[in-house]
Amino acid sequence: QAETDKKVLSFGCSTGEEPLTLAQQYFGEDPSVKIFGVDVADFAISESLKKSQQAPEGKITILDGREVSPKVHGPYDAVLGNSIFCIYGKAGVPFKNVTYVMENFPFSTFESMLEDIDSYLKVDGVLAIHNSNYNFMDTYLADKYEPISDKKCPGHFVPRIDCINKEFIGVENQLMDCLYRKVASSIDQVAITSSNNDYSVASDEIENEKELLANKKQIQLSHGTAMNRYPEQYSFLKELVGQQQEQA
């Protein structure tokens, strides 16, 4: 890959619909844009590899997140985490029980997963988050990002959690921020502590969450992302990546 290549990562690519959509419909005419997908489920990875063969050779790279970190192929110009940061819709899982969700996918895990993504997203890169149990702007990482406020996304069907009151917030009919530009490489605040938010945790607890995630794999990345489910987001992402290329 050339140093001038642009890289887009589908984080939790499931069975490969999102990487293929990006490769064929949005960046198919630009050989300098490479698409990466990562997941941790055998079936998802197998299906993603099959779909990647429908794109030109070298256009899509599928990674097994249990064996290699996406960071190896970074940094990325954009990372998409659509319908990933949530517990939703699995058979037998009480995803409408706020206590269950907060215990099995705590805010600290959400934050630590995003901390990992942040480590391989370029400054001026774009982070896309659609359908999440928590608000990205409530994390300590928010100081490094700014919402692209003139581009909001509809169709959020995953309930958002108000961590202070420990209750769900209905967001189904709202236009919400879903694209964030990284504007800084570091922040002064290292420990994730706050006297106002009882759901914040210290940095050593985040390391414990990471260890728990690695050992028990309690969060499965796979969430089926239907072909072209997020057309407004993808179109704007194409525009942003194009602007970055012009500035290079």
Image: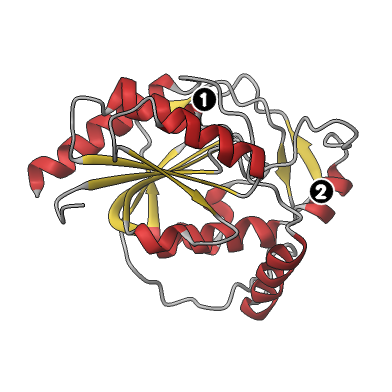
Q: Is residue 244 found left or right of 213 in the rendered image?
A: left
Tell whether 143 sits left or right of 56: right
The residue nearer to you, when weighing 64 against 106, is: 64
Helix, strand or loop status at disc 1: loop
Q: Quadrant of residue 28?
A: top left
Q: Which residue is mark 1?
A: 175
First along the sequence among labels 2 and 1 = 2
* Label 2 environment density (alpha carbons within 10 Å; few <14, some 14–19, many ≥20): few
Name the amino acid type tagged 1: Leu
Residue 146 image offset from top left, x and y in percent: 37, 49
- The residue tagged with tag 2: helix, strand or loop? loop
Residue placed most toward the observer, 209 or 29: 29
Horizontal arrangement in the rendering, residue 164 relative to residue 13 (left or right): right
Q: Residues within 10 Å of mark 1 (few under 14, many from 20)?
A: few
Residue sitting at 85 percent across and 30 percent down?
91
Percent across and percent down for residue 86 are 69, 42
Q: Residue at x 59, y 46 (%)?
A: 135
Q: Is residue 177 visible?
A: no
Disc 2 to disc 1, how far (Cα)? Answer: 22 Å
Which residue is nearer to you in this view: 197 or 152?
Answer: 152
Q: Position of residue 169 (x, y in %)?
A: 73, 34
Rendered residue at 69%/31% (across/down): 158
Note whether 172 is above or below 84 in the view shown: above
Res 245 label = none
Identify which amino acid the numbered label 2 is placed on.
Lys
Q: Residue 166: which disc?
A: 2
Look at the numbered discs 2 and 1 and tell me whether their residues touch, using CB distance below 8 Å.
Answer: no
Please tell me which residue lies in front, 178 or 219.
219
Please provide percent x and percent y for residue 153. 48, 26
